[in-house]
Amino acid sequence: MNFLDAVVQGLMLGGLYAIFAAGLSLIFGVMKIVSLSYGAFAVMAAYLALHFTEVTGWSPLLSLLLVVPLMAAFGWVLQRYVLQRTLGNSALPSILVTFGLAVIIENVLLLTESADQKRMTLGAIDTAAFEIGFIRVGVYPFGLFIASIVLLGILSLVMAKTQFGRAVRAISEDASTVELMGIRPKSIYAWSAAIALALAAIAGVASGIQTSFSPLSGGMLLIFAFEAVIIGGIGSLWGTFVGALVLGLAQTIGASFFPSQGILIGNIVFLIFLAFLPQGISGKVKR
């Protein structure tokens, strides 16, 4: 893999990470919840999509029409009736509850699905590619990259231009004051969680098409999402997007020089940011 090819592949990989990390950034930015079950939710969505395609014979992309609303509804209920009780001055209750949820989901999937690796396919699109100069770009990774820009663009517009988005931004700053103005934080939290799990579902299905997955794949996905959020800056969607691209580039460029150490090099880049630029690229973190 030459350097330019590694750069292009890193950008494409960053697009996938951006979709996944955007939901995590929303959850933490609005509710200050450190969700350790976010990766398990993405894997759960991938298995739902897999069974949908096996039963219907349809494309995995069409499964998003079912999986995304189901995961969004699950996120709404989970936040409204479970995670809402963990909100407070300490992050420990939410960490413990979401860790427990991740363990439950992983073990249920191990019992029902086995530990075998699974993968969904789009047929010829999996290997289809086009050339830009001397660089060959896969159709599916490129489409995923464009989808990440569109999804984050829509979410950014919602946050900037709608009443819901303004309420989300206000609550993330001072929930108690916003409540005095007649806005119900619990409702905003629930809808934010629904959006976050919808993004997790999209990322989980997209990842399940691009690479194989198992019930234990959620942990690695969660690490990549956290790294993208921290590199980009907590609370900034476009910062998270840039952070995801940086992480993807670090992994693929690193792998071009050290073929078996791409993920390790990505982790090292994350640690460098954490040590020297802890506020992230966007500088949104508050002391």
Image: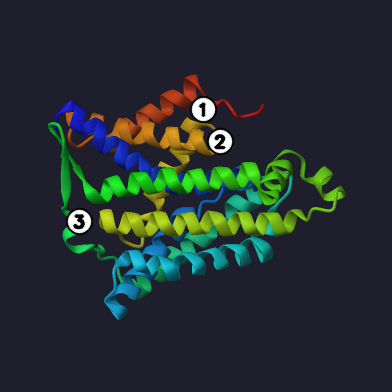
Residue 23 horizontal side relative to residue 191, left or right: left
First in residue order: circle 2 vs circle 3: 3
Q: Secondary structure beneath disc 1?
A: loop
Residue 119 horizontal side relative to residue 220, left or right: left
Residue 82 is at least partly visible in this image: yes
Q: Secondary structure beneath disc 2?
A: loop
Q: Position of residue 95 (x, y in %)?
A: 58, 50
The quarter of the displayed image where residue 149 is located? top left
Q: Which residue is mark 2?
A: 236
Q: Which residue is at the front of the view, 85 or 76?
A: 76
Q: Which residue is mark 3?
A: 126
Density class for disc 2 (Cα within 10 Å; few <14, some 14-19, many ≥20) is: many
Density class for disc 1 (Cα within 10 Å; few <14, some 14-19, many ≥20) is: many
Judge depth for marks 1 and 2 and give the one in front: 2
Q: Are marks 1 and 2 in contact (CB under 8 Å)?
A: yes
Q: Residue at x 19, y 26 (%)?
A: 3
The quarter of the displayed image where residue 63 is located? bottom left
The three-letter code of the residue at mark 3 reads: Asp
The three-letter code of the residue at mark 2 reads: Ser
